[in-house]
Structures are given as C-alpha cells and as structure tokens.
Image (spheres, rainbow, N blue to C red):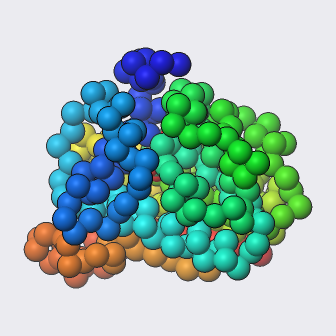
Amino acid sequence: MSISSLSKLPEIEKSACLALWALFLESRKKNSIYYDKKLNEMIDKLSCYFPKINYTSNYVLEIASRKELIKEVISKFINKNENSIIINLGCGLDNYFDRLNTTNVFWFDIDLSGVINLKKKFFRESDNYKLISKSIFDFSWLNKIPKNKKTLVLIEGLLPYFEEKDVKMLIDKIISNFPDSELIIHVISHLFYWYRSLSKISNNLKWSISNKKCVLKIFPDLKILKEYFIYDCHVERMSILKRILRLFPCYRKQNILLHLKSK
Ligand SMILES: C[S@@+](CC[C@H](N)C(=O)[O-])C[C@H]1O[C@@H](n2cnc3c(N)ncnc32)[C@H](O)[C@@H]1O
C-alpha cells in the first residue's frame, strides 16, 4: 500500500492516526511528557491525511498520559518476566516496542491489513518483533503466538468500539489460550461514552462500564491487579475546569486502565 492510499482506509483503521497526531502535538510542547524518535518521520509522511480535528490540550495530554502509563506498566512486567510475550491487539501506529528499547521480550502487534501495511513502511520485523495483519476476531492469530511463555495482552483504545458480547468472546478466547496471562485493557465509563458520543472524536462507541465490579461480573475468570485512572496523571497540566471537574469521582474515574490477571 502506498502512503497516499491512507486516505482510502476505512474509518475504523484511520482511527489509528488519532493518537499519533495527538502525540505529535504533545511532543512539540516545552513541558512534553512524550518522546518518540520515530514520531517526526511518521508525521512528515502522513500528516496531510490526518483528520482535521481541533484537539484540545486536555485531549492531547490524556492520550500522552495513557501511553506513558501503559509503557510504565509494561516495562515493570518485562523486568519481572524475562523473555515474555507481549501482544498488542488493535495496535494502530503505536510504537511501544521501539520505545521500550528492549530485546528481553517477544512482541506481536496485531491490526487490520491497512494499518499493518502502513506500519511496515516505518517498522522492520525481527526475531523479537512481529506484525500480524488480521482481525482480532479472526482467531487464527492465536496460532501464530507461542503458548509456553508468560504473556501480557494489551488492548488499548479498542474495546469501547465493540458490543459487550464481542468483548466477552475475545477476552474469554485470550484467557483460554493463555491461561497464565495478564491483560491491560482500556475501558471507559458510561459518562465518557455519553460525552464522546456527542463529540467529533470517537462518536461510534458501543461499550462502556459502570465500575470495575461490572468488569469482574463479565469476566469471572479474571482478577484485577490494579486500576489506573488516566485523569490522575499530570493534573498540574490540566485546565482549571478539568481540575475542578476531577473532584467529582464519576468524572475522575471515566477513563480507565485495568491491569488484570487470569485466576
Ligand atoms: C482508536 S485506534 C487505537 C490504536 C492504539 N491501540 C491506541 O490506543 O492508540 C483503534 C485501532 O484498532 C484497529 N481495529 C479496529 N477493529 C479491529 C479488528 N477487528 N481487528 C484488529 N484491529 C482492529 C484499528 O485499525 C485501529 O488501528
């Protein structure tokens, strides 16, 4: 696929660019919390295709905070589990593998063909890094991953786009194939769902939760190792309005990362 055909990608695959643009805006700030040496090259080649959306500073900070938090959790996992496997489902244009700068892991990035073809223009596969072009619901991707190692599955910025029954089917499949696995899933509250449904960004969401208890009800085979609220990160950089709104728990707890483990 040539880069110019990015404009022909289906909307769902184009959503991979949303985070990239936000991260670029963050990286240009003086007090940026995000650095990625690959970012400028990708933006140079792709910027003319980005959706013309006016990102707010809060949105840019939210994406960068999420990425940094996830990188930190993954880094701890890798330090504890040598030669483990990390699977990033719906990886988009994420660059965690490069940014973690480690050979102590076997990393699998999985996404639809348009995004993977695009990613291949910027990232080279190696013994430690593989790009898999498949729908996450085409479970033949499971056959491409070794099952004899400690495994962490990351699903970020994706589950809210699917119906609860599909989310359940996917997670159940992961747990049955990787019984000794951990997961990091990005979930949103009903408030976040409602608010984003009104905006131009991510207005095709389908799944949200009321609280972590309801996640455990849907996935009785999982336990929660830790719950992270994205709006607890870099509060000093938030607008005054957001800082005030954060005082309400339902606002603060709407954008969530759950670190889970199979029981
Ligand atoms: C909003 S982006 C999130 C990208 C990245 N994980 C992040 O959080 O920044 C959603 C990604 O999921 C991918 N995606 C959507 N449906 C998918 C499916 N059925 N199988 C694999 N990837 C899918 C899209 O192509 C896109 O790259």
183 sits left or right of 163 in the view: right
Q: Which residue is drawn at 60% across and 77% down?
A: 76
Q: Residue at x 51, y 73 (%)?
A: 72
Which residue appears farthest toward the right when viewing the image? 148
173 sits left or right of 74 in the view: right
Q: Answer yes or no: is residue 45 visible.
A: yes
The front one of 258 and 217 is 258
The front one of 69 and 159 is 69
Q: Residue at x 58, y 72 (%)?
A: 75
Q: Where is residue 135 in the image (x, y as percent from the top left)?
A: 64, 35
**Quadrant of image for the C terminus:** bottom right
The front one of 18 and 256 is 18
Q: Position of residue 35 (x, y in %)?
A: 37, 60
- The number of callouts visible is 0
Q: Answer yes or no: is residue 250 visible.
A: no
Q: Where is residue 8 in the image (x, y as percent from the top left)?
A: 41, 18
4 sits left or right of 145 in the view: left
* Residue 255, picture quadrant: bottom left
The front one of 2 and 86 is 2
Q: Where is residue 206 in the image (x, y as percent from the top left)?
A: 45, 45
Q: Residue at x 72, y 52 (%)?
A: 128
Query: Is 129 rendered above or below residue 190?
Result: above
Query: Is 171 rendered above or below residue 15?
Result: below
Query: Is 212 rendered above or below residue 151?
Result: below
